[in-house]
């Protein structure tokens, strides 16, 4: 789709929602400024980069076909490799020129005979365009369905669908598993949809690909989960009143997200489960809000504290349909950085707004402070009612805010990379892919995490569409 041929009513950031089909291997990137000598490894980012299949258009930002971009750093130099994930969704789109699987906000067109042969909703997508994780040397691309894709981190070649070594069943999961570096365990949430629905909290231990059940929570109307939180000893589920009738997903004609409905009169429920045995140890309710991303959680003086980005309702889901994002009149809701404090003694919940800067896609010094008391969150910020237009470093204890911005520039998720041996949460750099609407191109900016000053930028050979999440891997490849 060539947005330059559309009317002048398109948004300045609309090129970030245009298909970009270029693939490349180890293209050297010019460096303006100086990269730190210690920056060695690979930033791999995930996100949508193709928004149509033949003449059929994907409707939602979250529907676009997944493409990986790898930025490799060594000796003060950088190279770029990028490839599409060759999923079933991608292969059908390329070979048959049609949308073949049920995406987040788009269902495939099916003929009368196809509906007659299978009256149920089409298969949920394997278009793993949201996040990445290294699970025991398996490099995995994730989305909100259980269809996980494995790739080779050396050249981004798609290996195929990844199967855990167990018989767990379910349809939906989160794209944000958590890793406990002390216990050496990965945690996630699986959601089973059916006449009897359930949340299944599980873990994967070091050196295995078999999931182990921690807790099973039966639920009539499951909430939408994009992420959750962990502290040192607990797993915390925040159930917002954006809920699904399971039969709508299984037998209805609605898209996946349209199967959910916002119930404004319902509360948001916060539940705390033990990591070791799944015991529910506390639960409390607060006013309704919607959340995509948690920032962090920790335990303090007998309380469990959860920081997350909260919206007043689920309108942000509707606002991120592509027609709205590409329109010059685009207006997006603003999030608030909300702190929830659950007293384990009284089982009461208090909520406090920490920041109203419209943050999204938050990152922390994950390896050191996830699940612990912390100081800094890094995130793109939104202050114009439009799209994310600055990079923010917020001190959650003092509310001090530092930012980086440039006219007509729209940054993506900032990935913090610690200097080897770093203790302080801002001893390192922040990496972010930025769309420069003024030059109609993208660049990767490298910021000093302490000051948020620009250290270097890498001009890219083409626009990189707005993606979601990335990870920095100090070593690549498969063992």
Image: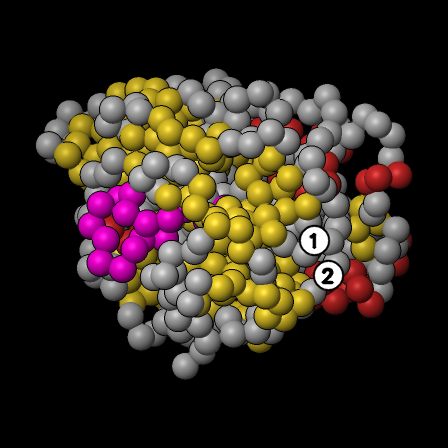
Residue sticking out furthest to the bottom = 479
**Disc assigned to residue 471:** none
> Is 124 drawn above or below residue 294 in the view shown?
below
From the image, which quarter does the C terminus lie in? bottom left
Select label 2 or label 1 by which is in front: 1
> Is 182 drawn above or below residue 412 in the view shown?
below
Residue that carries the numbered disc 1 in the rendered image: 462
How far apart marks 2 and 1 lie (CA) works out to 8 Å
Q: Quadrant of residue 2?
A: top right
Tell which circle, 2 or 1, labels the residue nearer the N-terminal end.
Answer: 2
Q: From the viewer's perspective, is 51 left or right of 167?
A: right
Q: Is residue 238 visible?
A: no
In the image shown, does 336 or 44 lie closer to the viewer? 44
Name which residue lies at 68% across and 46% down. Answer: 441
User: In the rendered structure, which segment of residues is drawn in magenta?
Assistant: 417-432
Q: From the viewer's perspective, is 292 left or right of 88?
A: left
Residue that carries the numbered disc 2 in the rendered image: 22
Q: From the viewer's perspective, is 337 left or right of 327?
A: left
> Is 22 drawn above or below residue 372 in the view shown?
below
In the image shown, does 242 or 64 lie closer to the viewer? 64
In the image shown, does 368 or 132 lie closer to the viewer? 368
In the image shown, does 196 or 123 lie closer to the viewer? 123
Are the two marked residues, 2 and 1, in contact with CB atoms closer than 8 angstroms?
Answer: yes
Instruction: From the top left corner, tell me how far across and down residue 72 is, in percent.
Output: 49, 65
Instruction: From the top left corner, tell me how far across and down residue 159 is, in percent.
Output: 58, 75
Q: Is residue 461 visible?
A: yes
């Amino acid at each position: 789709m060539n947005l330059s041929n559309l009317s002048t009513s398109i948004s300045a950031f609309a090129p970030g929602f245009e298909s970009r089909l270029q693939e490349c291997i180890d293209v050297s990137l010019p460096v303006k400024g100086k990269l730190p000598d210690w920056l060695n490894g690979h930033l791999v980012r995930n996100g949508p980069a193709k928004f149509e299949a033949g003449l059929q258009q994907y409707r939602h930002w979250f529907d676009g076909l997944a493409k990986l971009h790898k930025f490799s750093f060594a000796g003060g130099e950088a190279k770029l490799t990028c490839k599409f994930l060759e999923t079933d969704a991608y292969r059908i789109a390329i070979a048959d020129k049609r949308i073949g699987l049920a995406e987040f906000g788009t269902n495939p067109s099916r003929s009368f005979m196809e509906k007659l042969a299978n009256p149920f909703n089409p298969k949920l997508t394997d278009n793993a365009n949201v996040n990445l994780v290294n699970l025991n040397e398996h490099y995995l691309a994730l989305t909100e369905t259980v269809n996980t894709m494995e790739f080779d981190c050396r050249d981004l070649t798609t290996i195929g669908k990844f199967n855990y070594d167990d018989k767990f069943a379910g349809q939906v999961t989160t794209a944000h598993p958590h890793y406990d570096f002390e216990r050496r365990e990965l945690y996630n949430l699986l959601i089973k949809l059916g006449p009897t629905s359930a949340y299944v909290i599980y873990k994967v231990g070091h050196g295995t690909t078999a999931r182990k059940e921690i807790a099973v929570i039966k639920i009539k109307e499951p909430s939408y989960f994009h992420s959750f939180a962990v502290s040192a000893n607990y797993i915390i589920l925040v159930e917002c009143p954006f809920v699904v009738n399971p039969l709508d997903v299984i037998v209805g004609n609605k898209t996946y997200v349209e199967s959910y409905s916002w119930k404004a009169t319902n509360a948001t429920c916060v539940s705390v489960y033990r990591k070791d045995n799944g015991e529910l140890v506390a639960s409390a309710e607060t006013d309704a809000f919607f959340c995509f991303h948690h920032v962090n959680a920790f335990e303090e003086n007998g309380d469990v504290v959860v920081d997350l980005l909260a919206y007043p309702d689920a309108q942000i889901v509707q606002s991120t349909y592509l027609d709205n994002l590409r329109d010059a009149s685009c207006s997006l809701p603003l999030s608030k950085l909300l702190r929830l404090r659950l007293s384990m003694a009284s089982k009461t919940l208090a909520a406090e707004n920490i920041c109203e800067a419209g943050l999204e896609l938050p990152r922390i010094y994950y390896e050191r402070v996830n699940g612990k008391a912390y100081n800094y969150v890094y995130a793109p910020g939104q202050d114009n009612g439009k799209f994310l237009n600055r990079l923010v470093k917020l001190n959650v204890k003092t509310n001090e805010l530092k930012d980086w911005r440039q006219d007509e520039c729209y940054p993506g998720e900032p990935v913090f990379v610690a200097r080897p041996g770093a203790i302080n949460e801002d001893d390192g750099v922040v990496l972010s892919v930025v769309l420069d609407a003024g030059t109609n191109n993208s660049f990767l900016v490298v910021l000093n995490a302490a000051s948020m000053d620009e250290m270097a930028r890498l001009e890219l050979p083409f626009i990189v569409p707005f993606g979601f999440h990335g990870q920095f891997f100090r070593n690549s490849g498969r063992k």
